[in-house]
Amino acid sequence: MRNVQSASLECSQYSNLIIGPNGSGKTSLLESMAVLSQGKSFRNSLKKSIIRDGQSSLTVSALLRAIDSDSMETRIGISKFGGGKTVAKVALEKVQRVSTLSSLLPVCVIEPNSMDIIEGGPSFRRQLMDWGVFHVEHGFIDHWRRFSHALKQRNALLKTGQKDSSNQLDYWNRILVPSAEYVTNVRQKYMMELEETLSRSLTHFFMDDGIRIVLRDGWTDAGGYSECLDKTITKDLRYGFTTIGPHKADLEICAGNHLAKDYLSRGQKKLAVYAIRLAQIEQLQRKSGRQVSLLLDDLPSELDTNNCEKVCKEIKRIGCQVFITSINNTDLNSMIIDTLDPNVFHVEHGTVSV
Ligand SMILES: Nc1ncnc2c1ncn2[C@@H]1O[C@H](COP(=O)(O)OP(=O)(O)O)[C@@H](O)[C@H]1O
Ligand SMILES: [Mg+2]
């Protein structure tokens, strides 16, 4: 993985602190865990270069222990090859989909680009919401795949702009509609169930409850998705794609009467990201009984020490597993060590030591 040729970490079930100078390989270590859980890195722009220069593949594996039993162990692993091929394994057996690894090892990432949740386009917020929905609703992934496939076919038909393709449009609509409605329903249920935990979490970070999150489902549901598609068919044919549906859903994040993106300071936006993601983690753990691994890259960026401490205390209360990267910042590291009592790893030139 990048500049880390090989490394083996005896991780704490709870807190882990990775210390090293710039360019030593801290983020690369976190990326390896993201790859193991999600099949890809969180550093989008550098996706292609995660394999170490001069190597043809990378492999990450982990031995997962059940929270309540030391004897229950599962080995999971993933290899990625230069040509784009991915091989995922559970207990040495190949599995078809990386999502099998994701459900065994739920990983949540907070890093400087997570600010996109507040500042970026709707896709970042859909991704955030669907991360949670995926882990609590087992039917979600299949419905989402079916929906995406049918949507692609429908859009291809719309692009041709031919009215006489209505039979084929009907065919794809019949596949599209039930999955779209399922996806919308489970998203609504998820956001409703998250509400209480989220408002507690926002209060912890902001001391008031001025932040609200509203789900916009991407279509108005009066009469169902099928009727909505009928109503917008002229528009869809004109644009050459499906203009309404769960692929257009968004979360509206408001602070007071404003959109959070236009109103909050950078530090407050970052806190809002922590509040939302930690609430999701707490909720997932409570509902599924599984422990989430949180990858926290660059904790102090945009946050003062007091807020960093708030984050650490909340992580401790929730009881998730965490990997925090840090440069040699004595004050910050002492605070993390005092609050979380982590296993500490030092990284230098891609080599990890304890
Ligand atoms: N594919 C690669 N092969 C080898 N080294 C790489 C590759 N991609 C990035 N690097 C190098 O890996 C180093 C570690 O990067 P990173 O993990 O981001 O460091 P840190 O987070 O500790 O600042 C960087 O110096 C970078 O140049
Ligand atoms: Mg880094």
Image: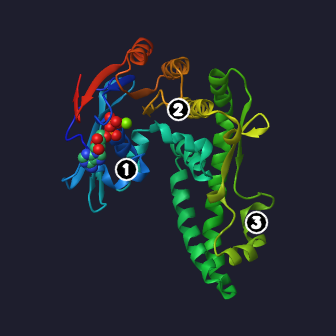
Q: CB of residue at label 2: within 8 Å of ligand 2?
A: no
Of the image marks 2 and 3, the number of the one nearer the N terminus: 3
* Towards the viewer: 4 or 316: 4
The residue sitting at 40% across, 40% down in the picture is 104
Q: Is residue 341 above or below residue 251?
A: above
Rendered residue at 55%/51% (across/down): 140
Any atom of ligand 1 within 8 Å of the CB at mark 1? no
First in residue order: circle 3 vs circle 1: 1
Query: Alpha-carbon neighbours of circle 3 within 10 Å: few (<14), some, or many (≥20)?
Result: some
Q: How many marks?
A: 3
Residue 3 x, y percent position in the rendering: 24, 42
**Marking on residue 228:** 3
Q: Nearer the viewer, residue 40 or 269?
A: 269
The local secondary structure at tag 1 comes to loop
- Disc 2 residue type (three-letter): Ile
- Name the residue tied to disc 1: 39
Q: Is residue 343 above or below residue 192?
A: above
| Ligand 2 - quadrant of the structure image | top left
Q: Earlier in the sequence, mark 2 or mark 1?
A: 1
**Residue 55 seen in render:** yes
